[in-house]
């Protein structure tokens, strides 16, 4: 029985969030294609994890026998998040762009699960090779050749951390121009937004089916 870890981080609920609507399409397709599978859902906006602390960080490099009570408590929470990731056969993450970067709640989760010697920078990592689909939604356009190409820090950062540091198999779905319907100055871009939204939902279905087929092979 395969397990999907579904993570959302948008501050907006349901259909008001471009990233949530796409991760939901991915998750629903996963369940339709793999009804005997399991989905672990974590909403980082509704239930944020603790930001990394000195106790949580140093405990990972110290002998457990020497841990202070504060280190024990902080490290236990990190381990719980790491184990949740380790048991996942696939991951889908909603990562909207806020002020050119990811939500701080998602950064906090990443800081907790990126544990050197366990999930990061080790050949023994249980998350190595795990397929992770990132829905990187953004209000404008930041792709190659666009005026704001140099401000694209979401995909570059997540590829470096998830792909290079954690050695996961990263794939992206990028719904863009999501502010067009709300911003009069972007009115002429609404058709491009609608096309991007439709393509993102189609990609979610195709990629979810692909992951299920990959795990079944």
Image (cartoon, rainbow, N blue to C red):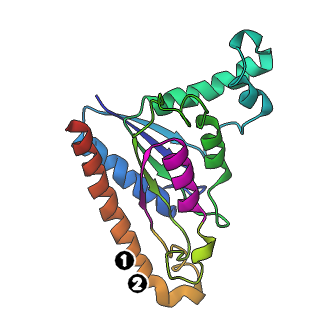
In this view, 83 is above or below 166 = above
Magenta residue span: 153-174
**Residue 166 colored magenta?**
yes
Work out how far the residue at label 1 is from the one at label 2, CA to CA, in angstroms.
6 Å
Query: Residue 193, percent across and down?
Result: 44, 78
Query: Residue 152, percent across and down?
Result: 58, 69
Q: Nearer the viewer, residue 207 or 67?
A: 67
Residue at 29 percent across and 46 percent down: it is 211
Query: Residue 174, percent across and down?
Result: 45, 66
In this view, 54 is above or below 46 = above
Asked whether the residues under the numbered discs 1 and 2 touch, taking CB atoms below 8 Å apart as contact, a structural biologist would say yes
Corner quadrant of residue 30: top left
Dot 1 falls on a residue whose secondary structure is helix
Marking on residue 191: 2
Tell me the quarter of the image containing the N terminus.
top left
Residue at 77 percent across and 12 percent down: it is 66
Dot 2 falls on a residue whose secondary structure is helix
Residue at 19 percent across and 38 percent down: it is 217
Marking on residue 195: 1
**Residue 31 colored magenta?**
no
């Amino acid at each position: 029985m395969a397990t999907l870890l579904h993570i959302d981080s948008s501050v907006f609920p349901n259909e008001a969030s471009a990233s949530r609507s796409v991760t939901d399409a991915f998750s629903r397709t996963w369940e339709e294609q793999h009804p005997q599978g399991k989905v672990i859902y974590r909403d980082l906006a509704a239930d944020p994890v603790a930001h990394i602390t000195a106790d949580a960080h140093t405990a990972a490099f110290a002998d457990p026998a020497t841990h202070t009570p504060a280190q024990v408590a902080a490290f236990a929470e990190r381990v719980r998040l790491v184990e949740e990731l380790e048991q996942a056969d696939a991951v889908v993450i909603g990562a909207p762009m806020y002020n050119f970067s990811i939500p701080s709640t998602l950064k906090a989760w990443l800081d907790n699960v990126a544990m050197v010697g366990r999930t990061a920078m080790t050949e023994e990592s249980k998350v190595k090779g795990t397929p992770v689909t990132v829905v990187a939604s953004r209000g404008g356009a930041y792709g190659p050749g666009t005026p704001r190409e140099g401000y694209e820090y979401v995909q570059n950062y997540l590829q470096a951390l998830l792909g290079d540091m954690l050695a996961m198999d990263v794939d992206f779905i990028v719904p863009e121009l999501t502010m067009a319907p709300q911003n009069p100055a972007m009115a002429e871009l609404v058709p491009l937004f609608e096309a991007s939204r439709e393509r993102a939902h189609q990609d979610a279905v195709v990629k979810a089916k692909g992951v299920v087929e990959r795990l079944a092979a």
